[in-house]
Image (cartoon, rainbow, N blue to C red):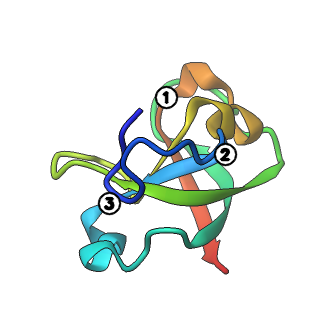
Amino acid sequence: MASACYGGAQEGVMIAAASDKLWDNGRVCGKYFTVKCTGARNPVPHPCTGKSVTVKIVDHCPGGCQSTLDLSREAFAQIANPVAGIINIDYIQH
């Protein structure tokens, strides 16, 4: 799958796309963020697992992206019920 940061190179599954807020003309490529679910943004009750996940930024989330970070399915499943789809998060950049 092609990405804005690495073209077609595989960067694993614990990855994410950065929104315009974090993108900074691609300077965020390759940076790591530890992400934790803090609560629901839709009717799914108690979506958070209580865990955190560290992801690598490999892509740019399109302009219509409603999130700060768009996590891969695998990364999202570590911190929340995949059915939730959209959650509130806290994150720290390393």
Amino acid, disc 3: Ser
Marks 2 and 1, how far apart at CA: 17 Å
Res 54 label: none
Residue appearing at x 59%, y 48% in the figure: 11
Q: Up-down: is 83 above or below 94?
A: above
Towards the viewer: 16 or 9: 9
Image check: 32 left or right of 66?
A: right
| Outermost residue to the top | 83
Amino acid, disc 1: Gly
Q: Up-down: is 72 above or below 33?
A: above
Q: Which residue is mark 3?
A: 19
- Could you classify mark 3 by the number of other residues whose Cα lies within 10 Å: few (under 14), some (14-19), or many (20 or more)? many
Counting every numbered tag in the picture gives: 3
Q: Quadrant of residue 46?
A: top right
Q: Which residue is mark 1?
A: 85
Q: Quadrant of residue 81?
A: top right
Say what secondary structure mark 3 lies in.
loop
Q: Nearer the viewer, mark 1 or mark 3?
A: 3
Q: Which residue is mark 2?
A: 14
| Circle nearer the N terminus (1, 3) | 3
Q: Where residue 26 sits in the image (x, y, percent)?
A: 32, 72
Marks 1 and 3, how far apart at CA: 16 Å
Say what secondary structure mark 1 lies in.
loop
Kindly check if marks 2 and 3 are in contact, taking CB atoms under 8 A apart as contact.
no
Marks 2 and 3, how far apart at CA: 17 Å
